[in-house]
Amino acid sequence: MNHSELAAFLKTRRDRVRPADVGLPVGPRRRVPGLRREEVAQLAGLSADYYTELERGRGAQPSAQVLAALARALRLNGDERDHLFRLADRPLPPASYGPSAHAQPALLGLLDRLTTTPAQVISDLHETLAQNPLAVALLGPRRAVKGPAASFVYRWFTEPDARKLYPLKDHPHHSRVFVADLQAVAARRGQDPEVTRMVAALRRHSEEFAALWETRDVAVRRADHKRIVHPALGVIEVDCHSLLSEDGRQRLLWFSAPPGTEGAAQLELLSVIGTQDMTTDVDELGRRRG
């Protein structure tokens, strides 16, 4: 444990937090730029003496619970929280996940710039977090559900209708890829309860999943060639590209086809028909484009 660095880090973080940020009155006699030591202790549920000893580079190694409380009190971001745990020589806490997560700003910024190709942001459990209009037209809108059913991987193995997105011949390939990707996610997240519950439920409800899980195949799904069944345009062959966020929790997916291919022509036509009623005469639209 690095007592001196831990003490210095706590002090700099304390100086950065303004009383108003944590609901405390400023007061006329405040002589420190941020919080007082006793205020940090109060917010973290610690004694003032104990926290003072930490800032002086003394005392015993703080527990993971104490570090988590300090991280909340000092409004630390994820990187700062991990740094705090490392300075105290404690194992890093589990990351925060969940289907209610919001798409990360960096990925959303890229998504906003992808206006001519289908693209969407998904979580590492294949929960759709954001889509551009062309992705809605190609794949359908994201489902407003919570729990395991928010994951396309979960629905793939439990809801037959989910498989209509891909031709029957391609189903074994996608099953193998989904399970290998989930193995990688489970290993990276450790004993994350969300993944543990999902895997347990899938093993109960799907013999196919259970058999594939036992193979222990592992591979992060970074790119793939897909055939997508569209209700108006038929089977569209596309290349699916994936950009992972730095922490691996989210992915930006975009779909393209080589110029001059039938897939490229279908994607161009997709931008015309969008999400309108699929009873539109697609052949007539194609002639107009030609």
Image (tube, rainbow, N blue to C red):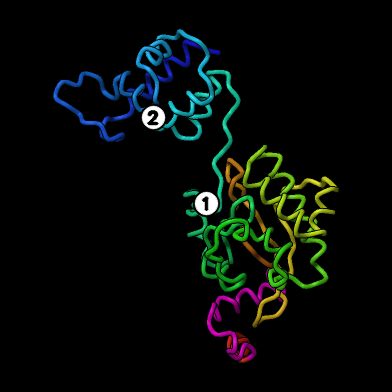
Lateral position of residue 172 relative to residue 20, left or right: right
For residue 41, which numbered disc appears in the image? none
Q: Residues within 10 Å of mark 2 (few under 14, many from 20)?
A: many
Q: Which of marks 1 and 2 is in front?
A: 2
First in sequence, mark 1 or 2: give its number. 2
Can see residue 195? yes
Name the residue type under label 1: Leu
* Residue 198 in the image, given as x and y percentages of width and height: 67, 51
Residue of label 2? 73
Can see residue 237? no
39 is higher (above) or lower (below) than 272? above
Name the residue type under label 2: Ala
Question: Gap between marks 1 and 2, in whole Å?
Answer: 29 Å
Closest to the observer, 121 or 27 = 27
* Residue 287 in the image, given as x and y percentages of width and height: 62, 90
* Residue 192: quadrant of the picture: top right
Q: What element carries label 1?
A: helix
* Residue 272: quadrant of the picture: bottom right
Magenta residues?
A: 259-283
**Residue found 70% across the figure and 67% down from its top:** 159
* Residue 262 in the image, given as x and y percentages of width and height: 71, 76
95 is higher (above) or lower (below) than 86? below
Given contact means CB atoms under 8 Å apart, are the residues at marks 1 and 2 in contact?
no
**Residue found 53% across the figure and 14% down from its top:** 61
Closest to the observer, 67 or 242 = 67
Residue of label 1? 107
* Residue 224 in the image, given as x and y percentages of width and height: 73, 58
48 is higher (above) or lower (below) than 67? above
